[in-house]
């Protein structure tokens, strides 16, 4: 709580300087930038070969995440040995198996009340000689999840936080659905899901978006307050349906990532991410092409959102 108060005092000074800063992203050293970028580089490296569910790249990513959870000090649930939740997909098929990575850090005040931070670690893998590295989609969200876990392990928060790196998102949100179907705690004790997906690309206007549970004024206030102090353009709400011509379809952001499974279960959510871009779902979505300045600022914004949500006592 001290860290939250200290930053809010700092933000009163910063707000007048960086409010709605759309020209050049700024960061304030809130997270370990070196580790954040290193984790992103590792998750989007050739060794991970696109992290397709069931591939050797997925195994490598899974081993990396387990090691990082242990180093940070994230605890495992008794029913999730070594942080692993296995699940069949689709429709209880014995042919395909996914692996979620799940752990948690205990809250200082509301230990039995949980915020769940999610990010899918799977991507498209390789097709012939082409590797779909998935730096933005979604090594960026997973590296941010790890950075936030590291920060909480140092400072603590009032609420307990579950960290969920999901598998098989690209095939149909199967990792999130499996988590909801076999929760390690009571659903009533989950107060919020914060989902992180594609945080590296802000476009010419350096925009990051937050979409949240409809008509939830508390979440609207959280987003507005963080937008006032974020080091980039933090926008309330994705465009309702964004057309992406390469796929000849529209993207419904409320159903486009892991938060949709939480919403279906009646759990409030905040979805944080950028929009689609020319490298989306191509081999050029690689570490070399990310906007590091924007990404660091986006990761800090996700951390500020979690702090702000944690500080809202009415979550309880």
Image (cartoon, rainbow, N blue to C red):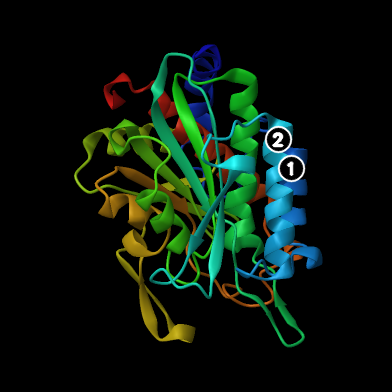
Q: Is residue 204 above or below residue 36?
A: below
Closer to us: 117 or 245: 117
Which residue is under mark 1? Answer: 67
Q: Is residue 260 left or right of residue 298?
A: left
Q: From the viewer's perspective, is 181 left or right of 51?
A: left
* Disc 1 crowd, CA 10 A, few/some/many (<14, 14-19, 20+): few
Q: In the image, residue 296 lies at what x, y percent? A: 64, 44
In what element is the residue under mark 1? helix
Question: Along the line of sight, which residue is nearer the eye, 238 or 118?
Answer: 118
Q: Residue at x 74, y 59 (%)?
A: 60
| Residue drawn where x is 26% and y is 33% of the image | 218
* Residue 151 seen in this snapshot: yes
Q: In the displayed image of the protein, which residue is found farthest to the front?
A: 94
Quarter-wise, where is residue 136 in the image?
A: bottom right
Residue 280: x and y, percent? 57, 72
Secondary structure at numbered mark 2: helix
């Amino acid at each position: 709580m001290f860290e939250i108060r200290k930053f809010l005092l700092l933000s009163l000074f910063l707000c007048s300087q960086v409010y709605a800063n759309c020209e050049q992203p700024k960061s304030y050293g809130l997270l370990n930038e070196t580790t954040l970028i290193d984790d992103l580089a590792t998750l989007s490296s050739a060794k991970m070969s696109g992290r397709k569910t069931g591939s050797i790249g997925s195994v490598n990513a899974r081993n990396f995440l387990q090691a990082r959870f242990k180093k940070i000090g994230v605890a495992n649930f008794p029913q999730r040995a070594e942080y692993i939740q296995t699940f069949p997909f689709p429709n209880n098929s014995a042919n395909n198996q996914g692996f979620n990575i799940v752990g948690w850090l205990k809250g200082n005040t509301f230990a039995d009340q949980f915020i769940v931070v999610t990010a899918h670690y799977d991507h498209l893998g390789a097709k012939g000689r082409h590797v779909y590295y998935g730096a933005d989609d979604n090594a960026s969200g997973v590296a941010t999840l790890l950075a936030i876990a590291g920060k909480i392990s140092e400072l603590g928060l009032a609420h307990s936080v579950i960290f969920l790196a999901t598998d098989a998102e690209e095939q149909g949100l199967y990792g999130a659905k499996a988590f909801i179907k076999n929760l390690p705690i009571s659903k009533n004790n989950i107060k919020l899901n914060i989902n992180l997906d594609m945080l590296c690309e802000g476009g010419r206007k350096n925009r990051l978006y937050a979409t949240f549970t409809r008509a939830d004024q508390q979440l609207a206030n959280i987003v507005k307050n963080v937008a006032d102090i974020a080091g980039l353009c933090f926008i309330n709400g994705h465009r309702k349906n964004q057309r992406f011509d390469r796929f000849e379809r529209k993207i419904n952001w409320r159903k486009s990532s892991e938060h949709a499974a939480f919403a279906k279960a009646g759990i409030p959510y905040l979805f944080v991410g950028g929009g689609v871009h020319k490298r989306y779902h191509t081999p050029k979505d690689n570490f070399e092409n990310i906007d590091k300045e924007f990404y660091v600022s986006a990761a800090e914004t996700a951390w500020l959102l979690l702090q702000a949500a944690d500080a809202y006592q009415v979550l309880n």
